Image (cartoon, grey):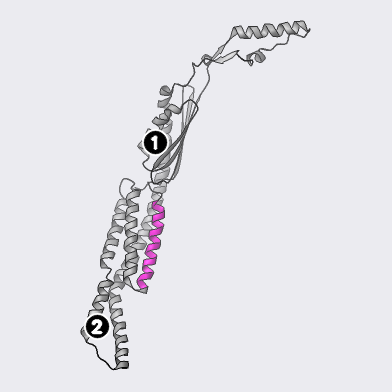
Amino acid sequence: MLLSMTGHGEAQRQQDGVVVAAEVRTVNNRFLKVSIRASDGYSSLEPQIEATVRRHIRRGSVTVNVRLDRQPSPDDFHLNEVVLTGYYEQLKAVCDKVNLPDSIRLESLLALPGVVSETGAGAADTDAMWPLAEQALVAALENLSRMRTDEGHAMARDLHANCDVISQQLAKIEVQAPLVVDSYRKRLTERLNKLLDEYEVSIEPADIVREVGVFADRGDISEEVVRLRSHLEQFETIARSEESAGRKLEFVIQEMLRETNTIGSKANDAEIAVYVVEIKTAIERMREMIQNVE
């Protein structure tokens, strides 16, 4: 089963006035790279977040955003009555002195420095927050996995179609390869006969046979064809395995391209060259796609 390295997943969990929203985005990368952004005051959760991500994702560039919001409670703040009373008495004295009406509003006093302060009682207890954050993160990763799996299925279908193209072109090469030697023998015989007639000399048939044998040995692509077909079968076997194995597929693709290039250089035949171009085109499409497989 192939997994795409590109995807997105998000989830939200809420409990006891705490809301946790997790978002995970992934793009392709040769290795696993995790970038984490957590709400202020919760940076200590980043090691646990990264460990959870690494249990679910093996390869790719991963961006994780975790937002934790907690509804405030009265215990989070302290009202300094002494400071509040002091502000009120000073303002009242000024109003009495200049004959202003006593219109001092409580909300105005509460906004003055030192009247209300945070107690720290509501400060983030990261250990207590982690179980809820983990639930949201795991749910986001599961949503991400579904998206990556769906895209992986589509990629597998396209890769299989390209494997079929390679197999078809390889079959044509297997048919054409034996004909190359016969064609060379005929061309060589015609050229030699023309030269022999022109210069009135003779040549032994064994010499022609020897020259054709050298050409056949130098242009023999049977081993490369067998290896390429073996690599093709290996590729499809790995692609159908339960685990996504992008790196293994990359290696097989490299071997397939190497064998194809050797066939093209040794065959010395225009028709086989056309088939080789088709195979290399399909391999290149597969190589680009495999770069996005975990």
| Amino acid type of the residue that numbered disc 2 sits on in the rendered structure | Ile
Q: Position of residue 3 (x, y in %)?
A: 38, 46
* Residue 13 belongs to the span the image colors magenta: no
| Amino acid type of the residue that numbered disc 1 sits on in the rendered structure | Val
159 or 43, nearer to the observer: 43
Question: How crowded is the residue under tag 2: few (<14 C-alpha within 10 Å), some, or many (20+)?
Answer: some
169 or 39, nearer to the observer: 39
Distance from Cα at disc 2 to Cα at disc 1: 69 Å
Q: For the image shown, how many numbered marks are present on the structure?
A: 2
Residue 258, compared with residue 148, is above or below; it is below
Which residue was labeled with disc 1? 53
The answer to which quarter of the image holds residue 24 is top left
Mark yes or no: residue 43 visible. yes
Q: Position of residue 8 (x, y in %)?
A: 46, 41
The answer to which quarter of the image holds residue 164 is bottom left
Q: Give the range drawn in magenta.
A: 271-291
202 or 264, nearer to the observer: 202
Q: Is residue 84 left or right of residue 101?
A: left
Q: Position of residue 112 (x, y in %)?
A: 64, 15
Question: How crowded is the residue under tag 1: few (<14 C-alpha within 10 Å), some, or many (20+)?
Answer: some
* Residue 287 belongs to the span the image colors magenta: yes
Image point 37% across, 37% down: which residue? Answer: 54
Q: Nearer the viewer, mark 2 or mark 1?
A: 2
Which residue was labeled with disc 2? 208
Instruction: Return the disc, 2 or 1, that comes first in the chain's sequence.
Output: 1
Image point 63% across, 14% down: which residue? Answer: 110
Magenta region's main secondary structure?
Answer: helix
Q: Name the element at disc 1.
A: helix
Q: Name the element at disc 2.
A: helix
Q: Position of residue 157 (x, y in %)?
A: 38, 54
